[in-house]
Structure formats: structure tokens, C-alpha cells
Amino acid sequence: MTELESGADLAVKVRGLRNQFGSTVVHQGLDLDVRRGEILGVVGGSGSGKSVLMRAILGLRRPQAGTIEVLGERIDRGTSADSLLRRRTGVLFQDGALFSSLTVRENVEVPIKTHYPDMPLSLRRDLARLKIRMVGLPTTAGGKLPSELSGGMRKRAGLARALAVDPELLFLDEPTAGLDPIGAAAFDELLRTLSQALGLTVFLITHDLDTLYAICDRLAVIADGRILVSGPLSEVEGFEHDWVQDYFHGPRGRAASGAGRPGS
């Protein structure tokens, strides 16, 4: 029931992916499409390989087999994404993954300096301040260390760094994990607003059902080493598989479904 496509409308195209650690096969024959301009939610049970898939797409790990194309560029087996591809993608790892010894502004400046080393310092700092404001942080947050921020502010700071070089494709790994419901809802709203305003394509790994119902255009479920099903949420939640049914139709799934639908 996966929806596979071809052509220029795809931001990510994965075919026949195999990831293996020793004798443990994580993915076997995995196919996935991510459409340009969509927010794709990627879900699956513990150990299903959601983060492994993301790292393979980013060129951060070498799959045993398969092909990956990102923004029309082939990521060849055994190689990392080139500098151009890295400029076109942004990544927010869990808890922001900020450099603890750098201020927020300095953290946001890192990818700008990496990809545009000749940019004047004053311009680089102005761009970093702009990104910090863009994610809803006060200007004063730029001078603080990550340890001086709340969890929600660290997430936003990590998002500012991920957006530093105006990427087309944004990867997010459990962005609302550890946030209280109010903070998570605010972060979801920010993601949706930025996605629409900037024309971003978003690959979003999450276990947060509220996030899925609030902002995702489509879902992809990883189970049994492959993409079990992908499509609109209304179709995916009806798929006949034990994990899918338990996930979407348990108490938390019913609560999120009711909260996420107008008029319910």
C-alpha cells in the first residue's frame, strides 16, 4: 500500500534499501517517496529503524544495498552527500544537539560559516540573529549557552541552526520529545507556519500522535523492515496490521484523533 512515484515532484526517492548491523537486518527492500512541499510523518515501533533511515538518506551511514536520491542528486553507496546537498538540507536532532560551549548565536553561525566561509562576520551574525527571531526566540537568547535555556528553547535554537542556510529539505528527529503538551503544540504550530512560509519539505520522525494529526500531510509506517504503508493519515490509520491498529486506535490514538479533527 505504499505510494511510489517518479519525477521532479519528489524531494526524496528511496528504492530497495537494506540496512544491517552484524546479523541484524533493520531494513530489507525499503522503498519511500517524500514529495516536495509536504510534511511527511515517519512512525514505527522501537527498533524499527526510523533514525537509521534518516541517517542513510542524509548520507551519514552506508546502507548495504539500495539507491537514494535527494533533491534530484544520487547518494552513491559508500559516499556522503556532497557540500551542495548539505547546503540544501537542514537537520534537527533530538534535544537540538547544540554545541554546549557555544552560544545560541554561535551555534546558528556554524553552518553559515561552513558553507559560506567568505561571508563577512557582520553579515553572518545578522543572519544568525534573523534565524533566531524566525523561530520565536527573543534576541537575548542569542547570547546564552544551551545549558541556560529551557528544553523548548533549545529545540527552537536547534531549529534556527537547521534553517541557517535556507534549506529546501528539513529533517526532524522527535522534535517534540520531552516537551509539555503546551510547548509541543506551540512547536507544531511553528513548524507548520515555517513550512508554509518557506516552502519547505519536511521529513519528520515522531511518536507524538498529536503532531501527526496536527501538521502532517502524509504518514509512512516502518514495520517488518520496510515501509508497511504510506499515505494520508485517514488511510494509514485504517490499515490492517497489529502495530498500526494498536498505535492509532488505542486510548492515546483516539484522544489525538478527536483533538486533531475539526468539529470533533
Image: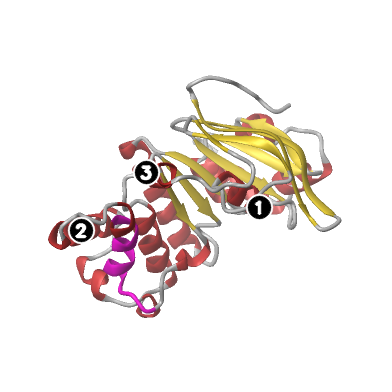
- Residue depicted at x 35% and y 58%: 161
Residue 248: x percent and y percent? 70, 44
Q: What's the distance in space between the residues labelled 2 and 1, CA to CA?
A: 33 Å
In this view, the residue farthest toward the left is: 122
How many numbered tags mark residues here? 3
Residue beneath label 3, please?
167
Secondary structure at numbered mark 2: helix
- Residue depicted at x 49% and y 29%: 72
Residue 52 disc label: 1
Residue type, mark 2 in image: Arg
In the rendered image of this protein, does residue 8 appear above or below residue 179? above
Secondary structure at numbered mark 1: helix
Q: What's the distance in space between the residues labelled 3 and 1, CA to CA?
A: 21 Å
In the rendered image of this protein, does residue 126 appear above or below residue 246? below
Residue 124 disc label: 2
Residue 260: x percent and y percent? 53, 42
Q: Quadrant of the N terminus?
A: top right
- Residue depicted at x 15% and y 58%: 120
Residue type, mark 1 in image: Val
Residue 82: x percent and y percent? 46, 45
- Residue depicted at x 64% and y 47%: 53
- Which residues fall within the magenta stretch? 101-112
